[in-house]
Image: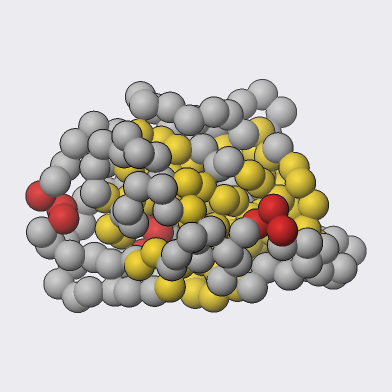
Amino acid sequence: MKVFVILFCLASATLSLAAPTTKANATFANTASVRQQLVDNLFVAPDLIRVHNVKTNLNTDTDSTTTQRAALIETSTLYEVKIPQTAPGANCSLVLFAGAFGDVVSGAQSVNFFNNTISDLAKQGMGNLRDRDLGRVNFNPDTKLFDFDETVVKDPIAKWFECPPAGTTMVFEAVAVGDFDAVNITQAPSSAINPPNGFSLRIY
């Protein structure tokens, strides 16, 4: 998948949605008051990544984003991310960046982000338990980030939502778009400066 440039936008409505955690459910919400708490960035890489095979329904461990769709294969990528105790802010967004040698982005060059009802990804051997569409991102070859496409989902939740409490574990899914889509991205560790290669949860 890819990282996208996150823009700060005002929203008047409050959006909420159950997001799976290992301990408790997190809530996605857009509230104007939280937007005032802008601080330094922290990009949190996944603690666990698994590939979901759409045809077999099996989930297997991996170390990279492996989202693809073609005639004989379809996979999505599941990410488990834990909100750190040292989280510097109250705002969250999803980021995908493909800037490493060997990364492959072809076909539609887009992914849709979803949340799901998985409570413990390590124990989820089968199924993705997909819930709600959080937004689409398209690869930008100039920045290597995946930018939000608001012509598909307006005001996407993945672009900005209120972070759950520190210690909360969240699971997200990156899903292929169109008839042919290949997004294979090496995952790098968390960063306090720039988005790491691969998927990350931006806290700011």
In the rendered view, does 148 fall on the left or right side of 67? left
> What kind of colouring is applied to the model shown?
secondary structure
Indicate the position of residue 55 as horizontal and vertical percent values: 85, 69
Indicate the position of residue 63 as horizontal and vertical percent values: 70, 37
Q: Nearer the viewer, residue 180 or 129?
A: 129
In the rendered view, does 141 fall on the left or right side of 108? left
Q: Can residue 113 be seen at all in this image of the molecule? A: no
Q: Can residue 28 be seen at all in this image of the molecule? A: yes
- The quadrant in which residue 198 appears is top right
Vertical arrangement, residue 84 with respect to residue 196, above or below: below
Q: Nearer the viewer, residue 123 or 32?
A: 123
Indicate the position of residue 166 as horizontal and vertical percent values: 35, 47
Q: Quadrant location of the C terminus?
A: top left
Identity of the residue drawn at 16% across and 55% down: 34
Indicate the position of residue 169 as horizontal and vertical percent values: 48, 53
Identity of the residue drawn at 43% across and 27% down: 191
Q: How many marks?
A: 0
Residue at far front of view:
23
Identity of the residue drawn at 24% across and 49% down: 90
Q: Nearer the viewer, residue 107 or 19?
A: 19
- The quadrant in which residue 151 appears is bottom left
Identity of the residue drawn at 48% across and 60% down: 23
